[in-house]
């Protein structure tokens, strides 16, 4: 049995779901083997698998014990749990570029864990290699005993009587459990966390006070307001003298209120996945000087923040080598075979590639997969080798498929019109190799350049706007509720030019009948158009006065938007514009200057060779 888990993140991990589906379709996973997928917030699922949205920790441990191998995302909770279990596993990091997380801290963690011997999959071909030879990483779990000892010395129970623990669920809750030698010494304990099967199973058996915060919290203005209101009541009742938090977003409202309303001492323990930069929660708390003690988990952060307490620092956080090529190993299953190409696919690699394809063809597989995830450049010799490989596979009635084509290579294939000849699997493109992440660089769309002066204006204006929002939110909410029972806020996912996605919120301006139409709309642009057709009486007033956009001040404050560029494209606009631009626009030409002319001149020869003009339809 194969177990796939993506943790409890609020962001989808559709790329991993696509990779699992690809491995099933190409028969790199035995069709008779059971596959269990815990998919979280993902909205695309593989075929022929058993799925669970959430799994309590007890059930998860039971499934891990039954599994042959485990494929997980590179989250702190998943990594810590798998480290403690003697089971082969591989981790797939989420990337901000593909809308899988708010930043790239999982990539940083993957770099560090890879150096410690943990297998990391940055492309579907890496999963194929792992499944062909799974192994148990020889990694010693990092203990928090030393950190607990230092906290015990600093915060004695004879001085601090009442302790509050604030954390999200998942890995942040697991990190708080690791600090039990410290907080278990206090007789008066109160918890603030999210209500999940895992947190309920752990906390309902305890006699401590428990408060369930509203989730999700990442860039979610309505839940921020709800947690602020909840925090006022909780802190007025508990009056903690000491508050400790392991993050994430839920920490901000509670720690700010505890610091400035109750005068509590604040301890913020940064996640082990934060190796190069602080989390957004820590940066906000640092901006408001709300932390009495910041605990960081890497040498780099310890150097950048001398007043922070460094704990369990990895020996090195340097990036993984850039131009690495996969091991030249051919992977074969009963019906498929896979081989990888080097960083530069040129004359030196072309001959070996053609010979390897010929050898694979003798076994008569149904499909031969060419993994291009590490290839950042290809020249005419490489194109000729691909063409020879295509002829070899067609001669035996097999198929040649290209996986994980990087943007520079894709631009060459498009120019050579090879995209019409080869099967290029789109489900494999979202690789996490450094070359690919750099190649799909932020695309510069028409927008204002953000300068320190403009950012200062944004922060000042957003602070004033949020103050006005706090004053008006109650009367606006009452007016909207009197007119309709629909939610006060409506949200929409937007995207910046660098591909980063975020959530924006506005006051609702339409009624129930309009929202029914919204559910039947086919796209976000359709929904926006339908909503604009039938505004309510209060909605017309909010639109006319622009008060419906007041919640956008939160996005301006945290840097998603600027007052100078409030208009951002919807996901539908991104889907229409970005795929082609990411492959072609602003890409360095992988063909050297000296060979550009010869490559262009040889295009007619390529077309004659592959009979493109006469066989385009048939191909």
Image: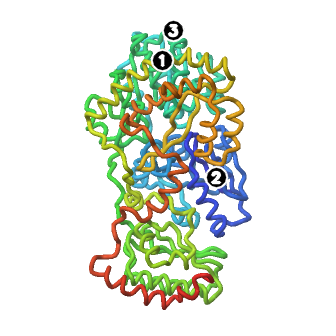
At x 41%, y 57%, the residue is: 437
Please give the name of the residue rendered at 54% of the width and 25% of the height, measured from the top-left corner: 542
Label whose residue precedes the other's in the sequence (1 or 3):
3
- Is 22 left, or right, of 605 in this rendering? right
Quick one: SS at disc 3? helix
276 vs 426: above or below: above
Q: Whole-percent x and y of residue 443?
A: 39, 54
Q: Is residue 211 left or right of residue 353?
A: right
Q: Quadrant of residue 399?
A: bottom right
Res. 44 mark: 2
Distance between mark 1 and mark 3 Cα atoms? 20 Å
Residue receiving disc 1? 470
Residue 201: in sight, yes or no? Answer: yes
Real-space Cα distance between discs 3 and 2?
A: 44 Å
Judging from the image, what secondary structure is the residue with disc 1 in? helix
In the picture, which quadrant includes the N terminus?
A: bottom right
In the image, what residue occupies the spot 64% across and 69% down? 26
Which of marks 2 and 1 precedes in the sequence?
2
Q: Position of residue 439 (x, y in %)?
A: 38, 61
Any mark on residue 110, and which? none
| Residue on which disc 3 sits | 236
């Amino acid at each position: 049995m194969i177990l796939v888990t993506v943790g409890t993140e609020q962001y989808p991990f559709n790329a991993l779901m696509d990779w699992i589906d690809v491995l099933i379709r190409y028969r790199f996973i035995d069709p008779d083997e059971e596959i269990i997928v815990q998919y979280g917030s993902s909205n695309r699922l593989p075929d022929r698998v058993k799925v669970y949205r959430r799994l309590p920790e007890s059930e998860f441990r039971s499934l891990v014990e039954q599994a042959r191998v485990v494929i997980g995302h590179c989250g702190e909770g998943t990594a810590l749990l798998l480290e403690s279990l003697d089971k082969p596993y591989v981790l797939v990091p989420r990337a901000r570029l593909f809308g899988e997380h708010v930043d790239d801290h999982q990539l940083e963690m993957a770099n560090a864990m890879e150096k410690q011997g943990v297998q990391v999959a940055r492309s579907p071909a890496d999963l194929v290699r792992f499944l062909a030879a799974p192994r148990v990483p020889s990694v010693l779990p990092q203990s928090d005993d030393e950190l607990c000892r230092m906290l015990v010395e600093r915060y004695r129970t004879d001085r601090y009587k009442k302790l509050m623990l604030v954390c999200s669920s998942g890995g942040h809750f697991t990190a708080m459990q690791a600090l039990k030698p410290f907080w278990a010494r206090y007789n008066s304990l109160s918890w603030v966390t999210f209500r999940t099967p895992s947190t309920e199973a752990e906390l309902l058996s305890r006699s401590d006070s428990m408060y369930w915060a509203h989730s999700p919290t990442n860039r979610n203005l309505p839940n921020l307001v709800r947690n602020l209101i909840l925090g006022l009541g909780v802190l007025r009742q508990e009056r903690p003298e000491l508050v400790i938090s392991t993050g994430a977003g839920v920490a901000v409202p509670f720690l700010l209120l505890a610091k400035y309303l109750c005068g509590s001492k604040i301890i913020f323990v940064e996640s082990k996945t934060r190796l190069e930069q602080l989390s957004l929660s820590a940066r906000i708390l640092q901006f408001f000087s709300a932390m009495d003690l910041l605990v960081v988990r890497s040498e780099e952060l310890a150097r950048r923040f001398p007043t922070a307490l460094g704990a369990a620092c990895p020996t090195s956080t340097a990036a993984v080598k850039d131009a690495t090529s996969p091991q030249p190993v051919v992977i074969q299953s009963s019906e498929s075979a896979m081989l990888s190409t080097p960083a530069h696919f040129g004359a030196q690699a072309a001959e070996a590639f053609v010979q390897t394809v010929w050898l694979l063809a003798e076994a008569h597989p149904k499909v031969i997969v060419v993994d291009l995830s590490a290839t950042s450049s290809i020249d005419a010799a490489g194109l000729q080798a691909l063409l020879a490989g295509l002829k070899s596979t067609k001669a035996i009635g097999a198929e040649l498929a290209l996986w994980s084509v990087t943007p520079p290579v894709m631009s060459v294939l498009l120019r050579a019109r090879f995209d019409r000849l080869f099967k290029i699997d789109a489900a494999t493109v979202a690789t996490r190799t450094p070359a690919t992440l750099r190649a799909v660089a932020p695309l510069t769309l028409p927008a204002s350049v953000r300068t320190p002066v403009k950012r200062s204006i944004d922060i000042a204006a957003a602070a004033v706007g949020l103050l006005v929002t706090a004053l008006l939110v109650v009367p606006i909410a009452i007016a909207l509720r009197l007119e309709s029972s629909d939610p006060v806020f409506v949200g929409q996912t937007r995207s910046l030019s660098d591909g980063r996605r975020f959530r924006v919120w506005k006051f609702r301006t339409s009624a129930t009948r309009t929202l029914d139409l919204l559910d039947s709309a086919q796209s976000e642009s359709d929904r926006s158009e339908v909503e604009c057709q039938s505004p309510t009486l209060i909605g017309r007033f909010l639109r006319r006065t622009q008060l419906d956009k007041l919640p956008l001040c939160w996005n301006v404050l945290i840097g998603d938007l600027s007052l100078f560029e409030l208009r951002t494209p919807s996901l539908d606009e991104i889907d229409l514009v970005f795929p082609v631009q990411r492959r072609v626009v602003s890409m360095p030409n992988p063909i050297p200057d000296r060979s550009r002319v010869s490559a262009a001149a040889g295009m007619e020869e390529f077309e004659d060779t592959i009979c493109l003009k006469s066989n385009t339809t048939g191909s």
